[in-house]
């Protein structure tokens, strides 16, 4: 995706071009007369690009604010623990410097542009109409994630682009214990990749196939979990399609 600065520069160039058209001289030689401008409605492709750019900018700054808040909270927690432990001033300062060093290293890793080559694909755990889900291991950290790999041509053919975009935006936006965490997303020429938290417990269908019948307490628990998950989605103005 283009950088924010590049995107804004293009908008400025378009504004300058419009201003220049307004100052054109008409055929009768009179200066300052507005030349007729044919205004065309933006195409669907243009509208989609504008919406995508807007969403990208909003998500970018939301993430920046969230990361900054979490960084402040980690420092506050450490300072409180150090105050309770009654450490020396020198040790106190050294530990705070160490925290700042680790925070800087973490931010540097966050700026790294992720790609499929950063992950080692492992077992396939799901397959859908235009994609698959595999367990994968991040090569740098060794952490295990679930990689959702979606074929872009199939998404376009089936008219599912907006649905997938909504799913990606929801996972990036919502911070809830009821919703799977999105670690990162990226794409290449053929595929869109969603790197998500790996939850080895399986889904509700797997549970029902394994147990066949749930006890009353189990049913009450899972219904409650489902209601909380749907509530988390509704708070962000999304509606799940499969609630019946």
Image (cartoon, rainbow, N blue to C red):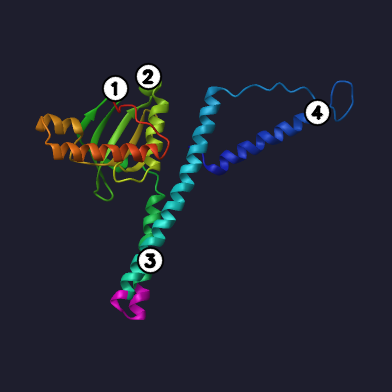
Q: CA distance from mark 2 to mark 4?
A: 46 Å
Residue behind mark 4: 24
Q: Earlier in the sequence, mark 3 or mark 2?
A: 3
Query: How far across and how far down the image is residue 166, in percent?
Result: 40, 32
Are the residues flagged by discs 2 and 4 in contact, CB closer than 8 Å? no
Q: Position of residue 119 (x, y in %)?
A: 28, 41
Label 2 neighbour load within 10 Å: few <14, some 14-19, many 20+ = few
**Magenta stretch containing residue 93, yes or no?**
yes
Q: Which span of residues is magenta-colored?
A: 84-94
Q: Helix or strand or loop: what does disc 3 sit on?
A: helix
Which label's residue is closer to the chain start, 2 or 4? 4
Q: Label 2, on which residue?
A: 158
Report the mark closest to the observer, 4 or 1: 1
Report the mark closest to the observer, 3 or 2.
Answer: 3
In the shown orientation, is residue 206 left or right of residue 165?
left
| Tag 1 secondary structure | loop
- Disc 1 target residue: 129
* Residue labelled with disc 3: 76
Whether residues under marks 2 and 1 lie with C-beta atoms below 8 angstroms apart, the answer is: yes
Instruction: Kindly report which numbered mark, 4 or 3, lies closer to the viewer in this rendering.
Output: 3
Outermost residue to the top? 157
- Give me the residue at 29% from left, 46% from top: 177
Front-lying residue, 9 or 57: 57
Residue depicted at x 57% and y 22% = 43
Residue 88 position (above or below residue 80): below
Q: Position of residue 171 (x, y in %)?
A: 36, 39
**Between discs 4 and 1, the one toward the N terminus:** 4
């Amino acid at each position: 995706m283009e950088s924010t600065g590049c995107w804004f520069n293009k908008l400025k160039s378009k504004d300058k071009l419009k201003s220049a058209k307004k100052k054109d001289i008409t055929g009768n030689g009179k200066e300052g007369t507005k030349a007729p401008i044919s205004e065309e409605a933006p195409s669907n492709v243009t509208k989609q690009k504008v919406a995508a750019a807007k969403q990208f900018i909003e998500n970018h700054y939301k993430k920046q604010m969230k990361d900054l808040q979490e960084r402040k909270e980690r420092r506050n927690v450490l300072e409180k623990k150090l105050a309770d432990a009654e450490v020396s001033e020198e040790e106190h300062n050294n530990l705070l410097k160490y925290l700042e060093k680790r925070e800087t290293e973490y931010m540097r890793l966050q700026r790294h542009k992720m790609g499929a080559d950063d992950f080692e694909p492992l077992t396939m755990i799901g397959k859908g109409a235009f994609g698959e889900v595999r367990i994968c291991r991040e090569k740098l950290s060794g952490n295990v994630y679930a990689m959702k790999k979606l074929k872009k041509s199939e998404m376009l053919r089936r008219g599912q682009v907006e649905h997938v975009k909504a799913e990606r935006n929801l996972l990036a936006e919502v911070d809830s214990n009821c919703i799977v965490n999105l670690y990162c997303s990226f794409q290449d020429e053929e595929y869109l990749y969603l790197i998500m938290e790996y939850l080895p417990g399986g889904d509700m269908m797997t549970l029902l196939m394994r147990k066949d019948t749930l006890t009353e307490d189990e049913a009450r628990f899972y219904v409650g979990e489902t209601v909380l998950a749907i509530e988390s989605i509704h708070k962000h103005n999304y509606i799940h399609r499969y609630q019946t």
